[in-house]
Image (tube, coloured by chain):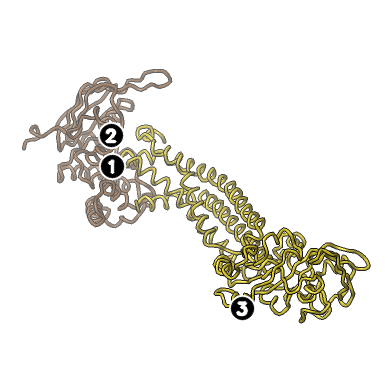
Chain colours: A brown, B yellow
Amino acid sequence: MKKSDKQPVIEAKGIYKAYNTDGLAVHALNGVDLTIKSGEFTAIAGPSGSGKTTLLNIIGGIDRPGKGDIHVAGSDLNTMNNRQLSDLRLYKIGFIFQAYNLIPVLTAIENVEYILLLQGVDKTERRHRSEAILREVGLDKEINRRPGDMSGGQQQRVAVARAMVSEPELILADEPTANLDQKTGSALLDLMKELNRKRGTTFLFSTHDSMVMKRADRLINLSDGKIAGGRKR
Amino acid sequence: MILYIKLAWRNIWRNKRRSLVVITSIGMGVFLMIITMSIVNGMNYQMIDNTISTSLGHVSIHKKGFIENIKPSYSFKPSPGIYEKIIRTGHVTGAASRIKIQGMVRSSEASQGVVITGIDPLKEKTVSELFKYMVEGQGEGYPDSTDREWIVISKQTAEKLDLVPGDRLVLMFQDADEQIVAESFYVRGIFVSPIDTFDKFTVFTGIKKLQSIAAMGSSISEISIRTETRNDAIGVCDTVKGFTADPGIETVTWQQMAPSMVSAIRLYDALMFIFFGIIFITVIFSVANTMIMAIMERFHEIGVMKCIGTRPLNIFIMITSEAINLGLAGMAAGLAASVILVEIFAYTGMDLSIFSESMRIWGTGSVIYPLLMIKDIVSSVIIVFMTAVISSIYPAIKAARIKPMEALNFL
């Protein structure tokens, strides 16, 4: 199947979002139209305040748009209640955060297993799949370490493993390399790219790092809450 | 579920000092609760036991109205063979006939109102512990006859009437024909029981001597029965009731003879629960405060958990489990410490002789042996569990309602 024939994972039309800050309306998104197809490796770039995180939050069902239609993995987010959105995030979307956001009291493998546990996967399979994905991200020797005992790069790899373990249709990553040094960030990006290639998982991440932009297959520039061009490789 | 319990256990150790303070406060609550309950149980047990072993017995057969009217006219002639029948009844360890008459004891110095109790010393040994309360070296000791003119008085009475063993005193009372009689006795021995009121108002003499002076013939006031345990009293009472056909005679247990003592014990229990209620209300606020602080510190983290698909119910379970874990840890510490201490004191006794006068008024004796009961442990477990659950409800609801969006922006 050619890339152009693939089903869209994300379809956003006319997305608006405004926040009320000290009585003033701040327009974070001003009519964003966006389609991301299955298997794409896309970066949303833009300066701070351009609306990257807001857009990712709306796509991830964490926030709701003020106006506009949004479909993710075949579901119309506007018609879903909080519980359905929670299930969508659990089964269809993997999240990678800038600050890793692992559960500090759980070990690497327990953090990864946590998602499968929420999905009701049985213990043996949970362990097997978690070990496999941690091996894939190069952390097979660190599985019993807690986040506090790991470097930033290692923690972000655990976060990638956590996001990937349930094989979601979409991975949303909000500035995943922002807290990492150049070398570690580059290695992480290689890893994400490799997982995208091998598994065909769709990646959408925000960044303002030019190195990251260069590695993306598709780049979308966001400025003042609007899409201001981009490129496709 | 297991993961949330594990998660909760690890979470409470993220701030060791704070958790230890909460665990200690819960532990102290449990410790105080168990220690207090055990001491009160021990006091109650000893109070009942002392009352039974001095005057009440476990079961009593007497004429209706006798308890309110301790007079020769409220006496009865026991049916032939009744004593043997009682002795052969299961769980009965002893039985003895007694005469009790309200009267007055006079010496050359003073006088005092008393209950004159006529006993058969040999049989009395099977129902009461008067023989244990005799002061050694004071007179001829525990009596051995039923028809001589001896009297045994308490140390308190001896001091008040300025009497020593060998001295003579006069007993005055109304006989069966309602005539005032007076008779001289010599003090054979002195006793000290653990009950103040008993000592103040009881004197003993031989049953046959008293029957003769009081013109009672072979009538007696009561048959006092001792059973193996106090719990056997009701069963024995039911059996023994069938031994007397006279409708004017009643057979009652110690609870029926001393309803005020039973009410006092119930009052103790009620007061204890009010006391524990106050302790645990303070614990509820302490745990709730800790949980709210813990949630505020982990606001972002809980938001992330919700963001990746954790349901509000799971968050609720996690927070509630944290409070329950704190409660159980505190309870384990409090229980262990209190059980050890109670067991030590149950063996050595708690010597409260510094308060001996007050203890004698309560009839407990000055050495208390704390008594730990399974029901107290069960109730403390339930109370702590409920406390932990109640204290965690508000914080857990608050945590379950955290909006992922707000939490992600909260750093």
Check disc 1 and report the residue beneath it.
A185
**Few, some or many residues within 10 Å of mark 3 (<14, 14–19, 20+):** few
User: With B396 as the anchor, is A83 left or right in this view?
Assistant: left
Q: Which residue is drawn at 39% across and 36% down?
A: B402
Residue B293, how many percent across, how many down? 49, 41
**Alpha carbons under labels 2 and 1: distance apart:** 10 Å
Residue B48, how many percent across, how many down? 65, 63
User: Which amino acid type is shown beneath numbered disc 1?
Assistant: Gly
Mark 1 belongs to which subunit?
A: A
Q: Are marks 2 and 3 on the same chain?
A: no
**Alpha carbons under labels 2 and 3: distance apart:** 105 Å
Q: Badges 3 and 1: C-beta atoms under 8 Å apart?
A: no
**Alpha carbons under labels 3 and 1: distance apart:** 99 Å
Check disc 3 and report the residue beneath it.
B84
Q: Specify the quadrant of the image occupied by residue B236.
A: bottom right
Q: Which residue is drawn at 38% across and 21% down?
A: A20
As helix, strand or loop, the secondary structure at mark 2 comes to: loop
As rendered, which of A196 and A18 lies closer to the eye? A18
Sooner in the amino-acid sequence: mark 2 or mark 1: 1
Q: Badges 2 and 1: C-beta atoms under 8 Å apart?
A: yes
As helix, strand or loop, the secondary structure at mark 3 comes to: helix
As rendered, which of A139 and A89 lies closer to the eye? A89
Check disc 2 and report the residue beneath it.
A209
Query: Can residue B41 be seen at all in this image of the molecule?
Result: yes
User: With B283 as the anchor, is A178 left or right in this view?
Assistant: left
Q: Badges 2 and 3: C-beta atoms under 8 Å apart?
A: no
